[in-house]
Amino acid sequence: MQCVFCAIAAEQLPAERIYEDEHFIVLLDIFPLRPAHVLIVSREHAPFLKDLSGAASEQLLPLAQRLAAALRAAGYGEQGINVLINDGPASNQHVPHLHLHLIPRRSGDTARLLWRALTRFWPLARKRIEARLKQEAQQLREALSNV
């Protein structure tokens, strides 16, 4: 099977897209660790950070900063945001295609985060999560247009 992120970039698979430019697609993680868990996915198939083009590399952190501002403007991550790249299989990278996570956090959510990390791929409450993702995507698109 083709890489899932390449298929999303080619619009062969659906995703709750928030933003797109020539280098990246921003979407919501379909197995979120916390509400409004965002992924910045490179358009180019780069399995490791070192494989990302220079032009895309230069834009990655500025885009992450803009998205962090949009998350906070929408009410997510006001107390903190994990910015994370799992670079390679040993780092828990499930899809071998560069993507950066922005995971909104709040004080006292560690137990829930850990539980979700253990259960996130279980098919529990998928309809409820999918409905929540649609709502979060709309909130973040609106917030992003104002930052």
Image: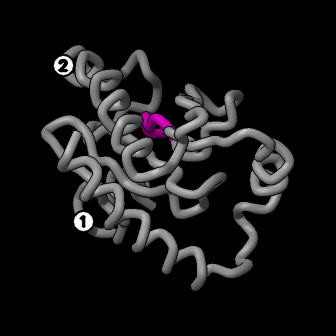
**Which residue: 69% across, 81% down?**
125
Read off the residue under disc 2.
55
Q: Position of residue 67 (x, y in %)?
A: 35, 39
- Against 25, is 66 above or below? above
- Label annotation for residue 123: none
What is the three-letter code of the residue carrying label 1?
A: Glu
Q: Judge whether 32 appears above or below 135 on screen.
A: above
Q: Residue at x 56, y 26 (%)?
A: 87
The answer to whether the residues at label 2 and label 1 have Cβ atoms under 8 Å apart is no
Question: From where the camera sits, is residue 51 visible?
Answer: yes
The colouring scheme, among rainbow, by chain, secondary structure or one colour, is: one colour
Q: As drawn, which residue projects farthest toward the bottom?
A: 127
The residue where tag 1 is placed is 11
Residue 41 visible? The answer is no
Residue at horizontal 18 percent and vertical 19 percent from the top:
55
97 in magenta = yes
CA neighbours of label 1 inside 10 A, class few (<14), some (14 to 19), many (20+): few
In this picture, residue 81 sits left or right of residue 43: right
Vertically, is 91 above or below 96? above
Residue reaching furthest to the left: 22
Question: Which region is colored magenta?
Answer: 96-101
Q: Is residue 127 magenta?
A: no
Q: Is residue 102 left or right of residue 3?
A: right
Q: Position of residue 14 (x, y in %)?
A: 35, 71
Which amino acid type corresponds to the residue marked 2 in the rendered image? Ala
- Residue 89, how many percent across, how many down? 65, 33
For the N terminus, which image quadrant? bottom left
